[in-house]
Amino acid sequence: MKESKDKEELTPLAKELESKAKKTTIIVVCVVAVIAIIFSVYYFALGGRYNGKYELSSVTVLGMTVESEDFAEVFGDQGHLTMIVKGDKCTFEGDLIDSFVGEEHQIKIKKDTVTLDFAVGADFTGTYEKGKIVIDMGGMYLNFEK
């Protein structure tokens, strides 16, 4: 008989704990949903999906393309260029085009159009397609791949 009395006394406590657990679960789900929404806005609306390092894979001039494997042969020691995109800013690392390196530049990517506003005063346009950025520098095309 005592056992059944103990169970009856614990039942309200168990119900209260169960109710607290449900409330905690709802709060956790809401926090996760808010984080997911913030991430989605950052990633899709603010351009976070474009962030990352893009390596120069080839250069095209006058219809002739030089692949990155041949940079050393064509450009000598100056055959490396990496573009790092973070939001609406980008920087360059490497030695192929020294005037780009060391400065922070503005970049805008909207769907498949890229606009670069270089700190040195030049503006260039290009295209974006599935992890590839092609910058048109007045007939010289720099092809970057993520």
Image: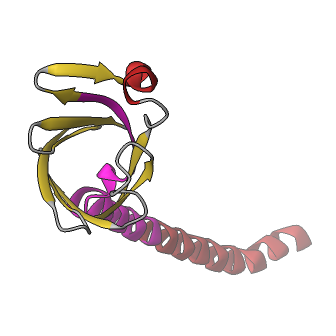
Query: How far across and down, in percent of the image, does residue 94 sit?
Result: 46, 47
Q: Is residue 111 visible?
A: no
Q: Position of residue 14 (x, y in %)?
A: 69, 73
Magenta segment: 31-59
Is 100 left, or right, of 72 in this rendering? left
Question: Height in image: 124 above or below 76?
Answer: below
- Give yes or no for residue 46 being in the magenta stretch: yes
In the rendered image, residue 51 lying in the magenta stretch gets the answer yes
**Most common secondary structure along the magenta stretch:** helix
Left or right: 57, with 133 as reference point:
right
Residue 16: name its quadrant.
Answer: bottom right
In the foreground, 110 or 62: 62
Please give the name of the residue rendered at 34% of the width and 48% of the height, measured from the top-left corner: 97
Q: Is residue 50 above or below residue 60?
A: below
The residue at the point 29 percent across, 65 percent down is 105
Query: Quick one: quadrant of the N terminus?
Result: bottom right
Q: Is residue 112 above or below residue 41?
A: above
Residue placed most toward the observer, 43 or 105: 105
